[in-house]
Amino acid sequence: AQTVTQSQPEMSVQEAETVTLSCTYDTSENNYYLFWYKQPPSRQMILVIRQEAYKQQNATENRFSVNFQKAAKSFSLKISDSQLGDTAMYFCAFMRMNTGTASKLTFGTGTRLQVTL
Amino acid sequence: GAVVSQHPSWVICKSGTSVKIECRSLDFQATTMFWYRQFPKQSLMLMATSNEGSKATYEQGVEKDKFLINHASLTLSTLTVTSAHPEDSSFYICSARDSVNYNEQFFGPGTRLTVL
């Protein structure tokens, strides 16, 4: 079974600053996906970024980037130039790479990020 | 991008009644949909995997007779909370997996259920 751990329940960052959210996971799989989802106060889950485990290059989406360390089973999210709209709950998630059957998402407990003026 | 809708967005019901929540994929076909439950300030907990045309697969500890799931078409899955009690009050979220791109899941906006 896979587990995902987010050790930071809450974090705060000032607008325009950079913040890094931590995530570690445990799996015996070699091929998998890792995700960061954002859940703002509206509670709509929004995909922030995705990383395929077989890719060595870290994924980047505009102000969002990850530091993927496969051997260490670490997958941190860096948010640059933080904006007030980044205030949300952030969930790290794991999914086995499986093309034939339903692949379930395993979520971490989440990190609540507050961006302040 | 792909859109998933849920209806209703919120519902209040009396204890002992049943409530049906719909999850629709609006612009893609979804052979698989997932149902999650989320308590305040907590993570999403997978309840069951819904497969079109077959029985749902429930996670350990989730009562099949309590949470009935029907996935009758490639765009619609329903979750019925039977004989609801106050402890069933929660936020229910569905997601749909694209039939073509297996590794994408798209989330609905959620349904807040309050049982009085």
Image (tube, coloured by chain):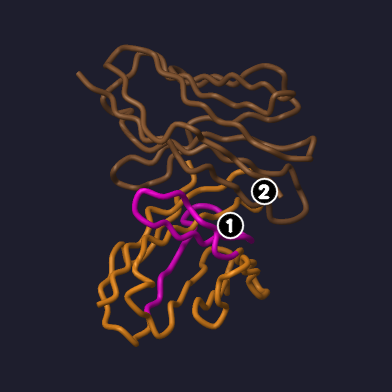
Chain colours: A brown, B orange
Main SS, magenta residues: strand
Q: Identify which residue is drawn at 70% across, 24% down.
A: A72
Q: Residue at x 48, y 43 (%)?
A: A109
> Up-down: is B24 above or below B11?
above
Q: Are marks 1 and 2 in contact (CB under 8 Å)?
A: yes
Compared to B113, does B44 lie above or below?
above
* The quarter of the displayed image where residue A58 is located: top right
Looking at the picture, how far across and down is residue A12, in whole percent?
31, 24
Q: Which residue is mark 1?
A: B29
Residue at the image position 45 percent from the left and 40 percent from the top: A110
* Amino acid type assigned to the residue bearing label 1 in the image: Gln
The residue nearer to you, when weighing B28 against A5, is A5
**Residue A1 numbered tag:** none
Q: Which residues are magenta?
A: B19-48
Left or right: residue A75 compared with residue A31 = left
Position of B15 with respect to B45 (left or right) is left
- Percent across and percent down for residue B13 are 27, 78
Q: Look at the image and say whether residue B47 sits in the magenta stretch.
A: yes
Residue B85 sits in quarter: bottom left
* CA distance separating discs 1 and 2: 8 Å
The answer to whether dots 1 and 2 both sit on one chain is yes
Residue drawn at x 53%, y 42% is A108
Q: Chain of mark 2?
A: B
Pick whichever of labels 1 and 2 is earlier in the sequence.
1
Please check the rendered image and state whether residue A87 is part of the magenta-colored stretch, yes or no. Answer: no
